[in-house]
Image (cartoon, helix red, strand yellow):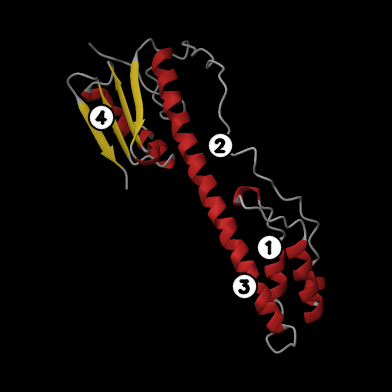
Amino acid sequence: MDMRYVIHSGLSDDQLISPEIELPEPPEHPVEPALSPEIELPKPQKQRVKQNQFFRRTPGEHLKEAKKALADGYKPHKNPMKTVWGRVFDAQRHLNAINQRSKEYKEARRLMKEVRLRVEGIEKISSVLTHRIMIKQREMVADEFEFLFLAKGFDAHIILTGPDKSYLKIESQPLCEAFILKIAHDTDLLLYLERADFKKVTLGDGERFTWSHTFG
């Protein structure tokens, strides 16, 4: 039997499915936010000083502005997610503008150590948030595949396993060898999954044929 189904939703431009077939709207269901509501975001920064005005400042003025930037909105917290770090990169910019021959240089180097500590804290938080967002994205990809199969009247067994839900396994009756090889070679399915940071994908019909691809 010739199974003329293709997975769409941006994965292929194949026109095997009639354009008259309309997929139903996805069911409404709450999505857990990837970002914690506890995270406090800093206030919008004030308009930056014009470039030429910045470089006309004296070392003392740069030092004063750096201190002001570090103090602006800074609220440390035992939970790093709730810490507001101040205008760290504005402070860094002012400190880098202080000449090492000036009397303010020694204090500028001391403040730069504080800047580095805060940048490290920001980078750690960014890493944690990126990690959460990528896991959430992989969960959404799995939900999307399940909806696409159900919309065409096929049951599909879709599971996420492995480190950080990075292994995707899809089993469904239309996933025969010919169909799997077609979508693997003629669509951007693998690129789509790689961008979601999957490490491995396994496709099969649940009975006779299984195909796997490892990324990286």
Q: Residue 47, located in which quarter of the rendered image?
A: bottom right
Q: CA distance from mark 2 to mark 1?
A: 25 Å
Q: CA distance from mark 2 to mark 3?
A: 32 Å
Q: Secondary structure at mark 2?
A: loop
**Labels 2 and 1 touching (C-beta < 8 A):** no
- The residue nearer to you, when weighing 175 against 124, is 124
Q: Few, some or many C-alpha atoms within 10 Å of disc 4 (few <14, some 14-19, many ≥20)?
A: some
Q: CA distance from mark 4 to mark 2?
A: 34 Å
Disc with the residue nearer the chain's start (3 vs 1): 1
Residue at 54 percent of width and 45 percent of height: 129
Disc with the residue nearer the chain's start (4 vs 2): 2
Residue 57 in view, yes or no:
no
Q: Residue furthest front?
A: 78
Disc with the residue nearer the chain's start (1 vs 4): 1
Q: Residue 185 at what x, y percent from top left?
A: 29, 34
Q: What label does residue 34 carry, if any?
A: 2
Disc with the residue nearer the chain's start (3 vs 4): 3
Q: Nearer the viewer, mark 1 or mark 4?
A: 1
- What residue does disc 1 label? 88
Q: Residue 132 at what x, y percent from top left?
A: 50, 41
Q: CA distance from mark 3 to mark 4?
A: 55 Å
Residue type indicated by callout 4: Leu
Q: Nearer the viewer, mark 3 or mark 1?
A: 3
Residue type indicated by callout 3: Lys
Residue at 64 percent of width and 37 percent of height: 37
- What residue does disc 4 label? 181
Q: CA distance from mark 1 to mark 4?
A: 51 Å
Q: Secondary structure at mark 1?
A: helix
- What residue does disc 3 label? 113
Q: Residue 190 at what x, y percent from top left?
A: 35, 37
Q: CA distance from mark 3 to mark 1?
A: 11 Å
Count the labels in the image.
4
